[in-house]
Amino acid sequence: MTRKLILYIAASLDGYIAKPGDDLSFLDAMDKEGVDYGYTDFISQVDTVIIGRKTFDWVFKVINNVPHPEKETFIITRTAREPIGKTQFYTGDVAELVRELKAQPGGVIYCDGGAQLANTLYREGLLDEIIVSVIPVLLGGGIRLFEEGIPERKLELLGSKSYETGLVQVHYRVKSDL
């Protein structure tokens, strides 16, 4: 069975994953003690993470460490760097990397952002599922989750869940046909 690549990401109701200036502060409103919005269950299935360099830099700054240090992680970047534990800085073709990873045995491959990476993987037809935590805010600008002109594809709803914070999480399978 082929491994799945799942995009798991948060976005405003109007489709932005960050405010102008790569500002993610709108996510802070969802912090609630004891509520992880299903993240623990999701990440327990994951053994490989792919993350864009800008997202990596932001997370590294916030937690002062590499994200997911126990998982095989690929930071997609143009600048080669030495690995940090299981975290590799990958400068090659990301579509080729994902095809190779999908051909290997293992668990879920997690696309942890950002938008440029997600759009590339979507355009290449490599995203199998998309989980979006819709944050109850309209930002009106910033970095869009999906850019204009992406190919049309049908999605199949696998599930949805709402939380008392107002966050609604939707889980779709990306269908290969229109």
Image (cartoon, rainbow, N blue to C red):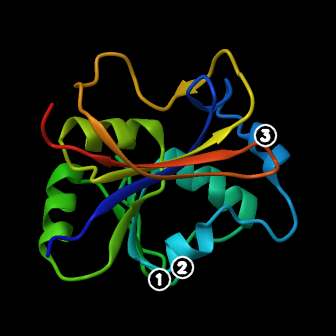
Q: Secondary structure at mark 1?
A: loop
Residue 146 image-quadrant placement: top left
Quarter of the figure that contains the C terminus: top left
Q: Is residue 104 above or below residue 172?
A: below
Q: CA distance from mark 1 to mark 2?
A: 7 Å
Please state which of residues 49 and 76 is positioned toward the viewer in this rendering.
49
Image spot of residue 118 (x, y percent): 37, 42
The amino acid type found where label 3 is placed reads Ser
The amino acid type found where label 2 is placed reads Pro
Mark before the other along the chain sequence, 1 or 3: 3
Residue 27 is left or right of residue 1, and the answer is right
Query: Mark 3 packing: few (<14 Cα in 10 Å), some, or many (20+)?
Result: few
Mark before the other along the chain sequence, 1 or 2: 2
Q: Is residue 159 above or below residue 82?
A: above
The amino acid type found where label 1 is placed reads Gly
Total number of numbered discs in the rendering: 3
Q: Residue at x 28, y 50 (%)?
A: 127
Q: Which residue is mark 2?
A: 69
Residue 93 visible in the picture: no
Quarter of the figure that contains the N terminus: bottom left
Q: Secondary structure at mark 3?
A: helix
Q: Which residue is mark 1?
A: 85
Please state which of residues 104 and 38 is positioned toward the viewer in this rendering.
38
Q: Secondary structure at mark 2?
A: loop
Instruction: Give yes or no for contact between labels 1 and 2 (Cβ–Cβ under 8 Å).
Output: yes
Q: Which residue is mark 3?
A: 25
Q: CA distance from mark 2 to mark 3?
A: 24 Å
Q: Residue at x 54, y 79 (%)?
A: 69
- Camera-near label (1 vs 3) is 3
Residue 141 is left or right of residue 147, and the answer is right
